[in-house]
Image (cartoon, rainbow, N blue to C red):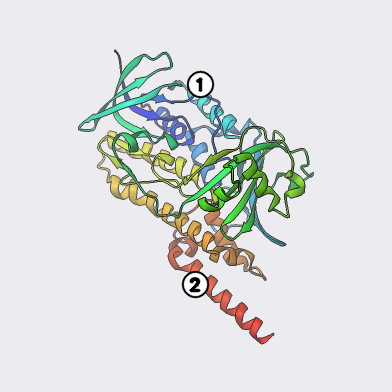
Amino acid sequence: MLKEVVDVLVIGAGPSGCVSACHLHNNGVKVKMVEKTKFPRLVVGESLIPRVMDHFDEAGLFPALDAMNFEKKLGARFIRGEEICVFDFSDKYGEGWDWTWQVPRADFDNTMAQECIKKGIDLEFESEVLEVSFEGKNSKTIVKDKEGNLKEISAKFIIDSSGYGRVLPRLLDLDTPSHLDPHSSIFTHVKDINREEGEEGTLISFDILETEVWLWVIPFSNGNTSLGVVGPTTFINSLSENKDNREALNNAIKLSDYYVKRFGGVDFLFEPVKLENYSRSVKRMYGDGFALTGNSSEFLDPVFSSGVCFATESGMKAAKLYLREQQGESVDWETEFTGYMRRGIGVFTTYVKEWYTGNLQTLFFHQPENPDVKKKICAVLAGYVWDETNPFVKKHDNVIKNMAYMLNQEKAAAEKNA
């Protein structure tokens, strides 16, 4: 069996793996990346949020990504019947990027992976991790390549960025149920032949069909658009008696008064993909000799596009903590990794839960708008969920619930007096 010795083994070549590998490589670390699939490959998570731009920039990936001319995402629109709420990332609380991208992930991830290779990082595609064992913090990983050959990789540290592959959670029995209710989605891409000119044609939108059911519309710069429906698993399953994903997605589009003309009857570019009960969690996010990043540790819900943000945030954080440890510093992984990531995850978890209770929608669509509240919520939607100077971050447990309660009380009183 072939043997290889590296400093860090990164499992997975998505955004999390590429960010962490590039940061380590830029700091003189010998990195090996293994990716189970062949790129380009289809994956969900096509709407980014501004916080990720900090990570792409710091990792040195921004120039290559920017050259691809992906659709710029300047904000997001939420639609509920005739009510519309638009968030503009340039009008948010605090500092941070004012824009990001809407991306076909096949092209986006491949661009990053190829940039890793150009930088000199050893990246093997179609290589599957079969076994991992640890002696102290040192690990030995058995990998099978596309020809079926086995290789043993010795590493001082493993960063598992395997996404839904969840390599270490499976091999080390780290999976645990999510705290979120079971939701599912069905999505595809369409050739957007009825796309309108200007902002209307390029704006990412979330069309609320029922309180817990919504349609996503993510236009790309290549003329295609990603379409998906999200809702409780029981509702998604009810969209087609035959469990036909194509029929289910078509039926969801028919429920959208806003988008049925644009997308009704439009051909799907590939058979719609169903992601069932997609929320994930783990018992712990690190251990002696490894860290879990991105979807391999936690995935919440697509409604606020937090997935790639947590992926790149945790990938960069794990890389930085490893570097400090190798320089002789004492690193408290529980506080500095798990604790840090859990704070941001906790904020978005609250926003996801309050979205599905309808409380957050009450704040979004209340008229007249409160500009101060909107700026602070916008900063959260932009991914700046570790900025505790923002009360909508620091007091996330109660602020949405309490404000929605007051607005509903005011509305009820006004209707009573009318």
Query: Residue 147: x percent and y percent?
Result: 42, 13
Residue 174 vs residue 341, the one in the foreground? 174
Q: Which mark is residue 61?
A: none
Answer above or below: position of 74 versus 293: below
Total numbered labels: 2
Query: Left or right: 297 with respect to 260?
Result: left
Q: Amino acid at mark 1?
A: Lys
| Residue on which the image places disc 1 | 118
The extreme left residue here reads 136
Q: Quadrant of residue 373?
A: bottom right
Which residue type does callout 2 highlight? Asn
Against 171, is 376 above or below? Answer: below
**113 is higher (above) or lower (below) than 240:** above
> Which quadrant would the C terminus be assigned to in this image?
bottom right
**Residue at coordinates 54% horizontally, 56% vertically from top-left?**
379
Q: Residue at x 33, y 36 (%)?
A: 170
The residue carrying mark 2 is 402
Could you tell me residue 417's position as x and y percent?
66, 87
Mark 2 surroundings within 10 Å by alpha-carbon count, few (fewer than 14), some (14 through 19), many (20 or more) = few
Q: Is 366 left or right of 169, judged from the image as shown?
A: right
Mark 1, other Cα within 10 Å: few <14 / some 14–19 / many ≥20: few
Q: Image quadrant of residue 77?
A: bottom right
Q: Secondary structure at mark 2?
A: helix
